[in-house]
Image (cartoon, grey):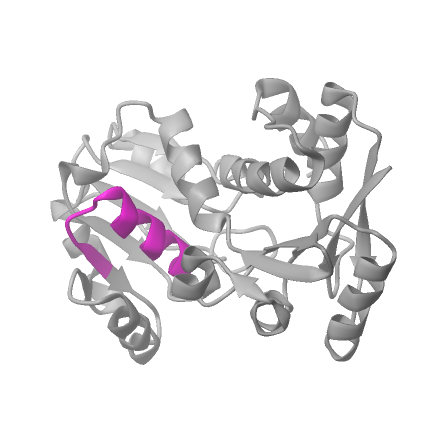
């Protein structure tokens, strides 16, 4: 049996076992994928124990994404650029670290909005946390000409912009609505608007109807941001697909089959929200 897991602290909220369990059944693979709650102080030792037990690899989530880089023997270029890893592959006792969040983000956009083209114009990104790092890297790699980055704490946005170079410019949080008039892509990478979090106050009144709007929040599936964007005639893409698509490369690396993100999988995960 091929074994993989997702590690976090806490981990009860993870939907990853639903995703990978669906694909294991679909492909008829003798494998398992489970949740494992691991405290930060035990992370490195736990990884070594997994290798000794013959695991093929693991997903890592908060708070282990930076520690996963530190313990890796090799690191992908995108994980290095993003500064975090979410996927570990174990081979011959060695650890390879990757970050598939950006790939999941882009594949979600292209599946949800097939006519979207990164080169059509600038993007506006809300937030400057870990998710924003992956989104910025992915958008730049896809060919977005420039990105306007806003965060409630401007200094944090400036620090992040300095990592990615002059194609990323910083604006004040209060100027985000005005800045949105000139963009072709708008992405919310914050937790604002998520169930249990503060709302995201963004009317979308300045948006062109040609702007694609994506919210990486997926609970609720249709956030106020997406509702407001639809009122402006904008195409919208919800955040669930990013969760599903980011899981594809890890599954392929561990279990040897390239899975598909299909409506059946979406419904399975939605039923658990």
Pick whichever, 262 or 67, lies toward us.
67
Of the 4 image quadrants, the one containing the N terminus is top right
Pick whichever, 51 or 160, lies toward us.
51
**From which residue to which does the magenta span run?**
132-148
Query: At 51% across and 54% down in the image, what residue appears?
Result: 99
The answer to whether any part of residue 270 appears in the image is yes
Query: At 27% across and 43% down in the image, what residue appears?
Result: 142
Q: Quadrant of residue 167?
A: bottom left
The answer to whether any part of residue 272 appears in the image is no
Left or right, 45 with respect to 191, comes to right
Pick whichever, 136 or 12, lies toward us.
136
Q: Does residue 147 lie above or below 213 as drawn?
A: below
Of the 4 image quadrants, the one containing the C terminus is top right
Query: At 38% across and 66% down in the image, what residue appears?
Result: 128
Image x and y of residue 6, in percent: 73, 52
Query: At 73% across and 60% down in the image, what residue appears?
Result: 93
Image x and y of residue 20, in percent: 71, 35
Image x and y of residue 26, in percent: 73, 20
Left or right, 119 with respect to 158, comes to left
Pick whichever, 179 or 135, lies toward us.
135
Q: Does residue 40 lie above or below 187 as drawn?
A: below
Image x and y of residue 188, in percent: 38, 51
* Numbered circles on residues, count: 0
Q: Does residue 25 lie above or below 132 as drawn?
A: above
Q: Quadrant of residue 264?
A: top right
Q: Main secondary structure of the magenta part?
A: helix
Left or right, 28 with respect to 118, comes to right
Left or right, 215 with respect to 43, comes to left
């Amino acid at each position: 049996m091929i074994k993989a897991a997702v590690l976090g602290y806490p981990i009860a909220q993870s939907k990853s076992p639903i995703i990978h369990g669906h694909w294991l059944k679909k492909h008829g693979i003798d494998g398992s994928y489970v949740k494992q709650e691991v405290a930060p102080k035990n992370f490195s030792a736990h990884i070594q124990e997994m290798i000794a037990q013959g695991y093929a690899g693991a997903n890592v989530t908060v708070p282990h994404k930076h520690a996963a880089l530190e313990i890796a023997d090799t690191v992908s270029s995108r994980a290095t650029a993003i500064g975090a890893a979410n996927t570990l592959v174990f081979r011959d006792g060695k650890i390879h670290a990757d970050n598939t969040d950006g790939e999941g983000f882009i594949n979600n956009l292209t599946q949800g909005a097939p006519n979207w083209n990164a080169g059509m114009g600038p993007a506006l990104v809300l937030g400057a946390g870990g998710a924003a790092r992956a989104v910025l890297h992915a958008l730049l790699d896809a060919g977005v000409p420039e990105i306007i980055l806003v965060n409630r704490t401007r200094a944090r946005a400036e620090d992040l912009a300095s990592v990615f170079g002059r194609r990323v410019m910083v604006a004040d949080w209060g100027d985000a609505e005005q800045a949105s008039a000139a963009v072709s892509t708008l992405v919310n990478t914050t937790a604002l608007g998520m169930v249990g979090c503060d709302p995201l106050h963004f009317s979308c009144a300045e948006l062109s109807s040609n702007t694609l709007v994506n919210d990486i929040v997926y609970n609720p599936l249709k956030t106020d941001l997406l509702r407001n964007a639809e009122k402006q005639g904008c195409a919208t893409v919800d955040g669930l697909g990013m969760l599903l698509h980011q899981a594809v490369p890890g599954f392929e690396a561990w279990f040897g089959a390239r899975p598909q993100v299909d409506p059946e999988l979406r419904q399975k995960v939605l039923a658990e929200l």
